[in-house]
Amino acid sequence: MQLIIINAIIFVVLGIIMVFSIILGFEPIFAAIHKQFQIPASFTDFIGRPWTIITYSFAHDLTGILHILFNMLTLYWFGKLFVEYLGSDKLFALYVLGAIAGATVYLLSYNLIPFFINRSAGYEIVMVGASASINAIVVAAATLLPDYTFSY
C-alpha cells in the first residue's frame, strides 16, 4: 500500500505543479521539476542525473490516468500476493531492483542497439513509469506461486 500511496502522491503533486505552471505561464519550471524524475536515454545525460535510475519508477505520464491506474491495480493485486508470502520489505526491494533492471535495459538499448540509436538521434528521449518494477513483481509472484489462481 505504501508504494501505491507514494506513486499516487507524486502523480498528484506533479499534476498540480503542471496545472499551476501552465496557468501562471511558468511551463519551464514544471519541465525542470519533471525532468528530475525522467530517466534520459543518453548516457551523458544520465551521468548528470543518476538518481533518475530510481525516480523514474515513481513518476507517470501526466497526459492520462490509465498508465498509473493499471500499474497501481497490478501492484495492488500481485503485491498483496507477494507480501503474503515474503513480506513488504522484500516487495519494496523488488520494486527498486525492478526499476534498476528496467533502467539498465533501457539505457543499454538506446545506447548499443543501432535501431534505437538511429531513432533517438536529435531527440531527447526519456522514460517514466513503474512498469518495469510492476513487471518484476508480477514475474516474482508467478515464479513463487506458479499454480496460484485468483478467485472472486
Image: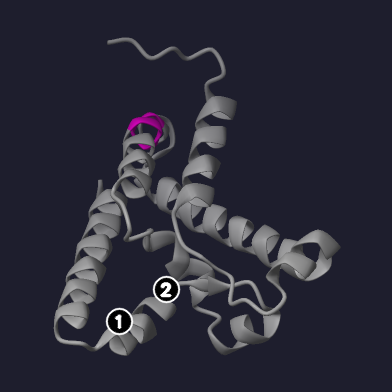
- Mark 2 and mark 1 lie on one chain; the one further toward the N terminus is 1
Q: Position of residue 38 (x, y in %)?
A: 47, 72
Quick one: SS at disc 1?
helix
Name the residue tied to disc 2: 37
Please tell me the numbered disc located at residue 64.
none
Q: Where is 39 relative to 152, above or below? A: below
Examine the residues drawn in magenta and state their main secondary structure. Answer: helix
Residue 18 visible: yes
Instruction: Please state, as top left, top right, bottom left or bottom right, where the C terminus lies in the image.
Output: top left
**Cα–Cα gap, marks 2 and 1:** 11 Å
Q: What span is colored magenta in the figure?
A: 77-81
Name the residue tied to disc 1: 30
Q: Label 2 amino acid?
A: Phe
Question: 33 or 130, which is in the foreground?
Answer: 33
The label nearer to you, 2 versus 1, is 1
Residue 36 visible: no
Q: Residue at x 67, y 86 (%)?
A: 44
Q: Label 1 amino acid?
A: Phe
Direction from residue 27 to residue 87 in the image, left or right: right
Q: Residue at x 55, y 35 (%)?
A: 140
Direction from residue 120 to residue 130 in the image, left or right: left
Q: Residue at x 47, y 52 (%)?
A: 95
